[in-house]
Image (tube, rainbow, N blue to C red):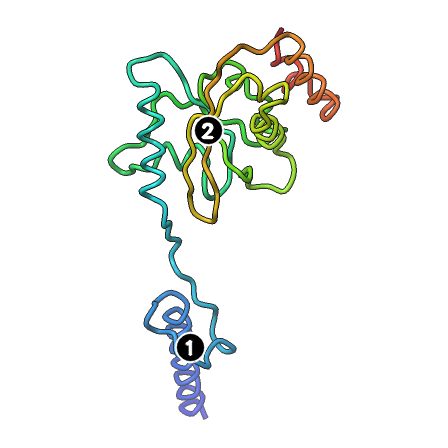
Amino acid sequence: KSIKYFIKSVLLCLVLFICYVTNFAKALIPFCSAKGTNSIYAARYTPLIRNDIIQVNTLVNYLNSLTKDTDKNIYVLASGSILNCDILRKVNMPASFNAIPSMENTCDIDLRDGFPTAFLNTDYIVTTTPVQTHLQTGQEVISYLADYLQNSTSYIGRHFSKIYEIELDDNIKALVYEKNSEFLKEDLEKMQQYYTQLYPNEDSLFKDRIHF
């Protein structure tokens, strides 16, 4: 009995090992994807591939040309999978971990990062249409500002001019805006009022950061 039990145990382990190996191959190795096995094995996973690397690099080169040998800076209003500040900053890894030295850090999440003071003083803004965020809610520090920026008649958009655009993956367009006038006191009051109404108990993250 002990011998039979041992043999059964070995055979069972062998079967489980074969299933594990074939499941791994089916999921991760491109040429191991036989038809009719989807109901048995895991779904196949393919590596993420961008088809717009040339366009992203073109955008990076353009942004650097705007600020080369100047003290001007750039701010990004986008945090999606197609465009965010990390994608732009690290597009040339491992050769460079900071492809755009003049780019400010982005505030992405309202209650984690608060209002982006850099937005008030930046010279150039990069955003997208449609606006790119990675959460469904809680990113008004991106979506609200980006929406009003792209409306040239709004109290934010009237201070900027669109100077460049380029299409990226998934029909996302990257847009570059140049600031052509300073915000007025009434503009800052509107921003402050909006975020105060949205987050009435978070003055240190919003109201106190919008000075006028």
Q: In this view, does 61 lie above or below 205?
A: below
* Disc 1 target residue: 19
Q: Residue at x 61, y 8 (%)?
A: 184
| In the displayed structure image, the side of residue 187 where residue 162 appears, left or right | left
Q: Nearer the viewer, mark 1 or mark 2?
A: 2
Q: What element carries label 1?
A: helix
Q: Which residue lies furthest to the front in this view?
A: 153
Residue situated in front as seen by the camera: 63 or 207: 63
Q: Which class describes the residues within 10 Å of circle 2: few (<14), some (14-19), or many (20+)? A: many
Please tell me how crowded label 1 is: few (under 14), some (14-19), or many (20+) other residues with Cα within 10 Å: some
Q: Distance between the residues labelled 1 and 2?
A: 49 Å
Q: Residue 7 or 1: which is nearer the viewer? A: 7
Q: Quadrant of residue 201?
A: top right
Q: Is residue 75 above or below residue 175?
A: above
Residue that appears at 64% across and 35% down: 138
Q: Earlier in the sequence, mark 1 or mark 2?
A: 1
Q: Which of 99 and 72 is in front in this view?
A: 72
Left or right, 207 with respect to 182, comes to right
Residue 126 is labelled as 2
Among the 4 quarters of the image, the one containing residue 158: top right
Q: What element carries label 2?
A: strand
**Residue 135 occupies quadrant:** top right
What's under tag 1, amino acid-wise?
Cys
Expressed as whole percent of the image width and height from the top left, the position of residue 64 reads 32, 24
Question: Residue at coordinates 64% horizontally, 13% vertically from top-left?
Answer: 188
Of the 4 image quadrants, the one containing the C terminus is top right
Label 2 sits on what residue type? Val
